[in-house]
Image (cartoon, grey):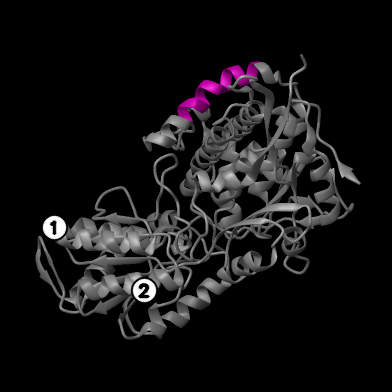
Amino acid sequence: MSTTTSAATSIDTGALVDRQLPDLRDAVAAARSRTYLSRYSERITDPAYGDDPIAAGAAAFEALQERGLDLDQPTTGETVPGERSPYGPQLSISYPAVDPAALVAAARDAMPAWRDAGPDVRAALCVEILDRLGARAHELGQAVHHTTGQPLVMAFQAGAPHALDRGLEAVAYAWDAQIRHAASVTWEKPGKRPTIMEKRFHVVPRGVEVTIGCRTFPTWNGLPGLMASLATGNAVIAKPHPSSVLPLGIVVEVAQQVLTAAGFSAHLATLAADTPDRPLAIELATHADVKLVDFTGSTTFGDWLEANATQARVFTEKAGLNTIVIDGTEQAAAMFANLAFSLSLYSGQMCTTPQAVFVPRGGIDTDEGHLSFEQVGERLASALEDLLEPAKKGVEILGSIGDPAVVERIEEAAGLGTVVAESRALEHPAWPDAVVRTPLVVAVDAADADAWDTERFGPIGFLVATDGTDHALELVRDTVGRRGAITFGVYAGSDEVRAAATEVALDAGVSASFDLHGTVFVNQTTAFSDFHATGANPAANASLVDDAFVAPRFAIVETRWHPEG
């Protein structure tokens, strides 16, 4: 049984390619130069989104729940119920249940025509998908908000424009990699009797790709792999987290609309919604025809995929232990404010949130004089209180916690040392059922590794007393090597400390941020300029986005022959 899409206006692919290629060249140039580029406005009230875009987005989200997703794909005839929002309401939408084998077979059968379309057509249609998602950015942001618990502004920005920019970056890298060489050549070897051959170099996709989405950032983490795979000729299956299905469902709906309007099979992009008691990830990821797997989530399952999905190239982003080293600062107030925001944003439910903050037990030198270790804790606690009060302001930074295990971890962590900042429950003025907690900060000694030396996902931070900055840097080197990390922040009191920390970052394979005092936070990375993760430590085996992320998704197959005559 299949659900079917409504008729769509046809797309002239030749005209689309002519229109999109200049923008793709600009995207490639930005990725190479690492300069600023953003195609989709992050300003939530930008008039480009309409006169009252927030209200319109909320209305579109409500209408979507009522009408459901319009998908064309094999189904079992049954449905998967919608998610419960971390803010309380049960979403009224449902999703088509699928048989993994049938979904993979349909995806595989759709690929030959897509392969033959060539890199230019594929890239142009991928950009068209992203642009149409951009037109639904507020609706997409609402879907992210109500499935992940992210605050609304963050859900809009990270879930729509920032995610779409990352998707465009992946398309640009994929397109550039495929057209880097000649598609054909008349080859001649000089000599008394020259040898002449015609040669063609065909870009061939690896096979079906499965994106196993995460609960917290379904589009930001999901779009790069999906778009890189689609742009390189592969069919894609989105397997969202059961708690965050709708955002990737919208992506698949729009992708199918674009693909079918251009004359291709809707089965090039399909949705595999599942439930915790009937998971599909293992069956999909280990299917013989699945050749690419993109995963964001726990280290346990990421390691399992790498070990068991051996027929596929597996790209993983897993857990890590992000650290901050404070040696000293000439802007103490701004440093504490920046740290407070980094610990608080989305209740610490980010793979980039710092957890262990290393401070010399003898204290630090600042523009406000020497601060003892205890005073550093007091100032950080005060900065958190200033940031998150009143409650209305706090909830718009913290969002809502949808996973009960996060709250359990907060309670457990409070008993691991001296509480510097207590985790408080805040009431959400609009959503009384929302679970909102301020960050917990616990002071421990570096010797108490059982407390701080493991990721405790959520609004949990440790102020770790060290013998000094050299000791802290060695702890970072060791921890990143064993646990992995996505981010590493340093407040350096001297050029020597900055140089030493840079060496640690390079040796451990983790990106470093120095002396962040303003509106840039260690949690954040920007498409086309910042590489998200490095692929060089255990937290992730790939980077978003670089050549190594796109190149394994296709092969070059050559055909050659002697010309007649």
Q: Residue 546: percent from the left, percent from the top?
A: 49, 45
Is residue 554 visible in this depiction of the protein? yes
Query: What residue is rendered at 65% in x and 16% in y?
Result: 15
Q: Residue reaching furthest left?
A: 369
Residue at label 1?
330
Q: Looking at the magenta stretch, what is its main secondary structure?
A: helix
Q: Position of residue 178 (x, y in %)?
A: 59, 34
Amino acid type, callout 1 = Glu
Q: Residue furthest top?
A: 565
The three-letter amino acid code for the residue at tag 2 is Asp
- The answer to the question of whether label 1 and label 2 lie on touching residues, with beta carbons closer than 8 A, is no
Nearest the eye: 75 or 107: 107
Residue closest to the far front: 192
Q: Residues within 10 Å of mark 2 (few under 14, many from 20)?
A: some
Q: Is residue 42 left or right of residue 224?
A: left
Percent across and percent down for residue 118 are 68, 28
Left or right of 261, for residue 154: left
* Residue sitting nearer the eye, 243 or 432: 243
262 in the magenta segment? no
Q: Which residue is mark 2?
A: 478
Quarter occupied by residue 124: top right
Numbered range of the magenta stretch = 15-27
The tag on residue 527 is none
